[in-house]
Image (tube, rainbow, N blue to C red):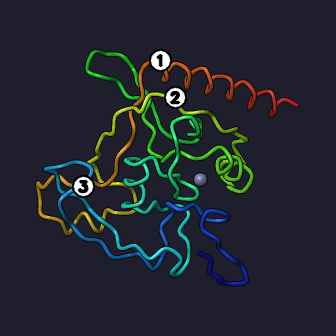
Amino acid sequence: MSTSSAGSTWIIGETVPWSAAWSGESAFALGPSTDFPGMTEVSQIERPGVGEPLFAAVHVSRQRRGLAQGLCHVCGAQTRPGDRWMFPVASGGFVTLHDGAVGYGCNVPPMHRMCAFRAAAQCPHLGRLAERPFRSPREEGRLISRTDVVPGMEALAAGHPPGMEIVYSCYRLFSPAFARAVRTRRDAWDHEARARRET
Ligand SMILES: [Zn+2]
């Protein structure tokens, strides 16, 4: 789908990631969660291409669906286990598990290799970081819900029944072994970034 505004053409999957929200998608509702049975979730109206893309805002329904079903963050199509990529310097974080071990949680849906390289070339944030795509592990990881209010949804949350636990977003939690690989990758990125600053 493409749309034009202010002289620029936005093409979902090309110049706008599939999971970005649009200004025409500002209606929300509460309902039973499909990905977390028994819980209540926020869903967002789906009108991609209507209005302006809001690059800083993730569409809450597409974000969860992408993570739950392995749909590509960039193009929205299905990814397969051997072709899932991520940017672990730019996104996600370390999570301490019950036994004290540390896993890595990624809150961005996976990307096809081609889509990840396109994002690296086109996304200003990734361009500043100069981060190369990193292959996701073969393990599926565990889908974990987040009931804390995500940035930008504070006003919406204020209207919800007090004390009610609501799923806003989710992330995929990967094993300590993959967390160590991410740590190594982040250290290497730090080293390269320092070397770039010194030259
Ligand atoms: Zn893709």
Q: Earlier in the sequence, mark 3 or mark 2?
A: 3
**140 or 56, which is in the foreground?**
140
Between label 1 and label 2, give the one nearer the viewer. Answer: 2
Does any atom of ligand 1 lie closer than 8 Å to the CB of label 2?
Answer: no
Tell me how far mark 3 sits from mark 2, CA to CA: 25 Å
Residue 19: x and y in percent read 49, 60
Q: Which residue is mark 3?
A: 34
**84 or 164, which is in the foreground?**
84
Amino acid type, label 2 = Pro
Q: Secondary structure at mark 3?
A: loop
Q: Which residue is mark 2?
A: 137
Amino acid type, label 3 = Thr
Residue at image location 65% in from the left, 83% down from the top: 5
Labels 1 and 2 touching (C-beta < 8 A): yes
Which quarter of the picture shows residue 198?
A: top right
Does any atom of ligand 1 lie closer than 8 Å to the CB of label 1?
Answer: no
Tell me how far mark 3 sits from mark 1, CA to CA: 30 Å
Rendered-image quadrant of the C terminus: top right
Q: Is residue 85 above or below residue 66?
A: above
Q: Which residue is mark 1?
A: 177
Tell me how far mark 1 sits from mark 2, CA to CA: 10 Å
**165 or 178, which is in the foreground?**
178
Residue 15: x and y in percent read 67, 65
Q: State how many labels appear.
A: 3
Q: Is residue 74 above or below residue 91?
A: below
